[in-house]
Image (cartoon, rainbow, N blue to C red):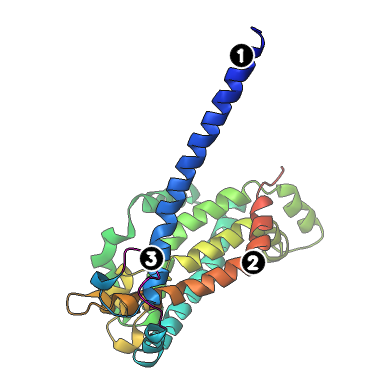
Amino acid sequence: MSSQQPVRRSSATAVVNTVVLTAVLVIVAIAVIWPVVHMIAAAFTPGQSIANMPVVPFTEGFTTDHFTFVFTQTDYPLWFLNTFIIASLTCIGTLVFASMGAYIFSRFNFVFKKSFLMGLLILNVFPSIVGMVAIYVVLLRIGGLDTLWGLVLVYLAGNLPYTTWMVKSYMDNIPRSLDEAARLDGASSFRIYRQIILPVARPILVFLAVTSFTLPWMDFIFPKLVLRSPEKQTIALGLFNFVTDKNNFFTNFAAGSLIVAVPFIIFFVFTQKMLVASLAGAAVKG
């Protein structure tokens, strides 16, 4: 009898722990999912003001007028195109320059190498918003204000210090014997970078592509600083006009925000296996 009591106590403790953990996870899940559900409901709820939104979603009717308004009464397609161009160019530029810079820092020795690396590390300490005045002045002098390419330059300058360090740390773990074997076969440094290093570093590059594309997608601060013309607006700037002091079109804002999320949902659904496989292979054996 005495030996069975500890077993029963441990079983009861395990059940209590499971119940408590499940309850906590359910509460956290509801706290995370509830705003998303509320936003989806707002996109299909009649009316405009947030004050008219029901406490329980989907209880005040159903309409698609907000989506019609966004596409027919605003420049939302143009905002979407501008944002896509900025995010795509930022992603491509970050991949190219960060991977090439990381390869140079990882595989070559040159004067002031440690100083350059320390400079990149110091730049990571300061947030980009600290240099907003300097960014504005530089773009003004080079004619980059109110241009999409000027905003891309801002994002590239902010991305490269951190991403170069991150990719370099990954490339440092790639065996140098691969480089040496390729050089014995007569391969140049650029060919080694393109045909050997990049394929092996694919996991970190996939992660870098996703993050560098996502970050500019809904950024508001730097587009507000750089862009001025209505035809150069991004999604974040355009949607912000729906919920200013003068306007209270919350349901239209919710509809536009929901459309923004759809491409990412489709992307992750179709590339989930590839992303998981790439990140699962991130460990490189020396």
Mark toward the viewer: 2 or 1: 1
- Residue 109 visible? The answer is no
Residue picked out by circle 3: 38
Quadrant of the image for the C terminus?
A: top right
Prevailing SS of the magenta stretch: loop
Cβ atoms at labels 3 and 2 below 8 Å apart: no
Q: Position of residue 76 (x, y in %)?
A: 39, 85
Q: How crowded is mark 2: few (under 14 residues within 10 Å), some or many (20 or more)?
A: few
Residue 3 in view (yes/no)? yes
Callout in the foreground (1, 3) = 1
Q: In this view, does 173 lie to the left or right of 247?
A: right
Of 140 and 85, the residue lying toward us: 85
Q: Is mark 3 on a helix, strand or loop?
A: helix
Dot placed on the residue nearer the N-terminal end, 3 or 2: 3
Q: Residue 150 carries which label?
A: none
Residue 151: give x, y in percent of width and height.
37, 75
What residue is rendered at 49% in x and 68% in y?
213
Q: Where are the magenta residues, as a range?
A: 54-63
Q: Could you tell me which residue is drawn at 47 percent across and 71 percent down?
A: 261
Task: Nearest to the eye among marks 3 and 2: give it.
Answer: 3
Which amino acid type is shown beneath numbered disc 3?
Answer: His
Residue 47, x across and y down, in percent: 29, 80
**Measuring 76% from the left and 63% from the top, which residue is drawn there?**
187
Task: Tell me the tag on residue 6.
Answer: 1
Q: Name the residue under label 2.
A: 271
- Which amino acid type corresponds to the residue marked 2 in the rendered image? Thr
Disc on the earlier residue, 2 or 1: 1
Q: Seen in the image, is 239 located left or right of residue 5? A: left
